[in-house]
Each structure stands twice: as structure tokens, then as C-alpha cells.
């Protein structure tokens, strides 16, 4: 019994070795591929009720287009109120600056009067009490200027607070507008106008570029699929419909072929995912294709 098991194991090893050597010589290989499209789900970052029309399936959406909006209760009023408060702060600042200019002019007039009254006091024509009165007025003007200048920091702090709140409201408004990050065709419309949409729930799904072919290539045949090279492909149901496909990318890591058993591949075989772009041919997502590469 043990001898039989040993012979069977040795035979399997020899067969696998020969198969690997045969694969390594770069001769013709055929694998199954499937057409996949690159999809993009568009969703809101917060919840709300849709208040605009949502594009139908098949419609073209351009990058930067507004896809939908959700209700914004009170946001417009809040933005208007905050803008009005900022205008009031700016008006107070203009009034403060005008008051400083007035006090500075008054201070200059007081300084001129002090010189004149000082000479008269020295000459004994005016009383020293008049000079003291001017000095008190000068001190009051200087204190008033300092007080008005100190108000600048308080007004700036109030304006920054209002601006921060206004930017938050504007951000909420932007989050309530769904803008397409890329152009494409609407594959699925998940919600209609008037429906409630949860944060993160897709509103529409876009096909952002034409479907491409995805094939799982065994490691020993990866040399037949260089990036930039071309292979022959045809629909599995129509062998006469041959076309060329360009190798776009090769996934840098291998994985077990358990996701889809495309072709005569063992489920414990490690494969590399290769992406192919059909040349001058349009394919339909979900179609299966035969990929032929290597020497004939």
C-alpha cells in the first residue's frame, strides 16, 4: 500500500514538473477572462432628503456636474444672519476708526491750545487753571484713543468667530450638494427625488470608463503577458470575433485562484491578475472571453 502511494506521489510530481517545464517554454496559452467596468458610487457625507432630480440610468454625467442636492433646513437663514453680523462688526470697526481720527484731531488742537495758553500763563495774562483744564482734556483724549485701539482686538476676535461659523455653514451647504468627481454613464440610480438618503449610501453608480478584460494568469505563464504587449481575444460564444487587446497592468501580488476558476486552473494555483484593454472594440460588462498568448 505504501509503495503504491509512493509511486502515485512520484508520478504526480513528475507530471507537474513536466507540465511546468512545458509551460515555461512560452508556447501558446489560453485562459478565460471576464469584462469588468470601473464603477464609482456617489454618496453624501451626511443624511438628508433629496430635493432635486436624480439622473436616470444611461444618462451622461460630466466631471464637476451637480448630481443631486439634499434639503438644507435653516442653513441659508443661518448664513444670511452670520453675514449680517459680520457686516455689523465691520461697521463698528469703521466707526471706531473714525472716532480715533476725531480724537487725534482733538488731541492736536489741545496741544496747540496748550502752547498758546502756556505762553499767556507765563506772561500773566491767563490763569494756570486754564492750562490744567487743557491737560485734563489731553489725558482724556489719549485715554480715548487707547480704548478705541484696544477695541480692534475684540472686533477681530468676534469677526473670526463669525467667519468660522459661516465657513462651517458653507461646508454643510457643500456637503448637501453631490458633485461628480469623475465623468461617466449612470449605471444604477439608487434613490429618487423626495427619498431620504443616509450618509454614505450611494445615490447613483457611474461607469467611469469603458469595460476592460480581467484575466488570472498563472505565475509560470506571466512572461507571456508583458505590460504594453498585445494578445488575441474573442468572445467565448463567438470564436470568429477575434480582436487584439493591450496589456495595461499586472497586479504586483499573486493570489489564489479561488475568486473565479477561469479556465482549467486548480483552486490552489497562485495567479496574477492582469488587466487588458480591447483595441478598437467595445465589450459588455460580464461577458467572458478567451485570451490567447504566447507562441503558436
Image (spheres, grey):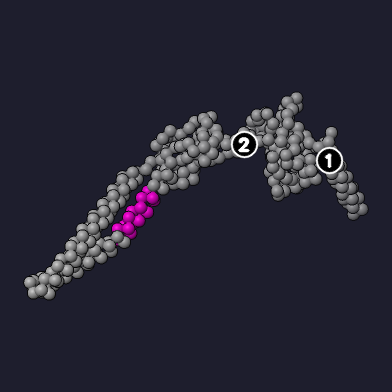
**Which structural element holds mark 1?**
loop
Residue in the foreground of this view, choosing between 143 and 196 = 143
Q: Can residue 190 be seen at all in this image of the molecule? A: no
Q: Which mark is residue 37?
A: 2
Q: Quadrant of the C terminus?
A: top right
Q: Mark 1 = which residue?
A: 26
Residue 124 placement, left or right of 287: left
Q: Which residues are magenta?
A: 154-169
- Identified at 22% across, 66% down, the residue is 142
Q: Can residue 178 be seen at all in this image of the molecule? A: yes
Q: Residue furthest front?
A: 123
Q: Residues within 10 Å of mark 1 (few under 14, many from 20)?
A: some
- Identified at 37% across, 43% down, the residue is 72
Ranked by sequence position, the earlier of labels 1 and 2 is: 1
Q: Residues within 10 Å of mark 2 (few under 14, many from 20)?
A: some
Kindly report the distance in space between the C-alpha atoms of the residues bearing marks 1 and 2.
Answer: 30 Å
Amino acid at each position: 500500500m505504501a509503495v503504491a502511494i509512493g509511486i502515485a506521489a512520484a508520478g504526480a510530481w513528475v507530471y507537474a514538473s513536466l507540465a511546468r517545464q512545458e509551460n515555461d517554454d512560452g508556447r501558446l496559452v489560453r485562459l478565460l477572462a471576464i469584462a469588468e467596468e470601473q464603477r464609482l458610487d456617489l454618496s453624501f457625507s451626511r443624511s438628508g432628503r433629496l430635493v432635486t432630480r436624480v439622473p436616470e440610468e444611461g444618462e451622461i454625467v460630466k466631471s464637476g456636474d451637480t448630481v443631486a442636492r439634499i434639503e438644507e433646513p435653516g442653513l441659508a437663514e443661518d448664513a444670511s444672519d452670520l453675514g449680517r453680523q459680520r457686516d455689523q462688526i465691520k461697521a463698528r470697526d469703521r466707526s471706531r476708526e473714525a472716532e480715533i481720527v476725531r480724537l487725534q484731531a482733538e488731541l492736536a488742537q489741545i496741544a496747540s491750545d496748550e502752547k498758546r495758553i502756556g505762553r499767556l500763563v507765563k506772561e500773566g495774562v491767563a490763569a494756570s487753571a486754564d492750562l490744567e483744564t487743557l491737560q485734563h482734556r489731553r489725558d482724556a483724549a489719549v485715554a480715548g484713543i487707547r480704548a478705541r485701539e484696544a477695541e480692534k482686538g475684540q472686533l477681530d476676535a468676534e469677526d473670526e468667530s463669525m467667519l468660522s461659523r459661516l465657513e462651517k455653514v458653507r461646508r454643510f451647504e457643500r456637503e448637501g450638494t453631490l458633485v461628480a468627481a469623475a465623468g461617466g454613464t449612470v449605471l444604477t440610480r439608487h434613490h429618487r427625488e423626495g427619498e431620504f438618503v443616509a450618509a454614505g449610501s450611494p445615490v447613483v453608480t457611474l461607469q467611469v470608463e469603458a469595460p476592460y478584460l480581467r484575466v488570472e494568469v498563472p505565475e509560470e505563464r506571466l512572461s507571456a503577458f508583458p505590460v504594453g504587449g498585445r494578445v488575441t481575444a474573442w468572445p467565448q460564444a463567438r470564436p470568429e470575433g477575434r480582436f487584439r487587446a493591450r496589456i495595461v497592468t499586472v497586479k504586483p501580488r499573486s493570489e489564489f485562484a479561488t475568486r473565479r476558476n477561469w479556465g482549467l486552473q486548480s483552486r490552489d494555483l497562485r495567479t496574477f491578475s492582469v488587466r487588458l484593454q480591447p483595441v478598437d472594440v467595445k465589450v459588455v460588462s460580464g461577458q467572458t472571453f478567451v485570451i490567447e498568448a504566447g507562441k503558436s
